[in-house]
Image: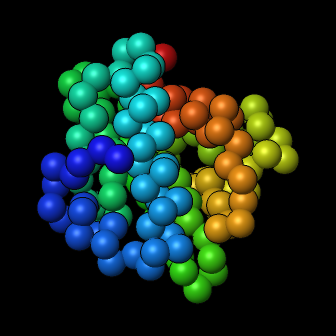
Amino acid sequence: MRAFVNNDVEQRFEKWPAELRGPLMGLREMIFDVAENTGGVGHIEEVLKWDSPSYQTVRPKSGTPVRLGGNAEKAQYGLYVHCQTSLIERFRDIYPGVFTFEKNRAILFRLTDDLPQEELRHCISMALTYHLK
């Protein structure tokens, strides 16, 4: 696993129950991996926004931030995007029936879900390159 640079983000991950921490760490790794392997995406900055880990492109500002969140009581976690983008609508069009969505802001997963890796990586790539249209 990739080392944390931001102590606030690391502490946020430590606060999540173990059953959420593992899947969220997996999403974190996927975000960094997709960023490194997607043309046009530069440096990714990991910060804490609204008490959630947020991943934003900074050099260049190629995309919109993606955030991670989880709810142990509901046994779910998710990948969040800015609600004023068209990303969730596009994800719904491209991958009908593949994901569970929360309005226009998130892709949600149950702890028992097997993640659709290829489709999820594509969604992350679309978010990280959102401004390159």
Q: Relative to residue 39, is residue 19 drawn left or right?
A: right
- Compared with 133, 24 (above or below) is below
Q: Residue at x 15, y 61 (%)?
A: 7
Residue 30 x %, y %:
47, 40
Residue 10 x %, y %:
24, 63
The image quadrant that residue 12 belongs to is bottom left
- Compared with 47, 19 (above or below) is below
Q: Residue at x 43, y 20 (%)?
A: 37
Q: Residue at x 84, y 47 (%)?
A: 97
- Compared with 126, 17 (above or below) is below
**Residue 90 appears in the figure:** no
Residue 29 x %, y %:
42, 43
Q: Residue at x 69, y 56 (%)?
A: 101
Nearest the eye: 21 or 79: 21
Q: Relative to residue 59, is residue 41 drawn left or right?
A: right
Nearest the eye: 52 or 4: 4
Question: How many dots with numbers?
Answer: 0
**Residue lying furthest right in this view?**
97
**Residue 63 appears in the figure:** yes
Residue 119 x %, y %:
68, 35
Q: Relative to residue 73, is residue 59 drawn left or right?
A: left
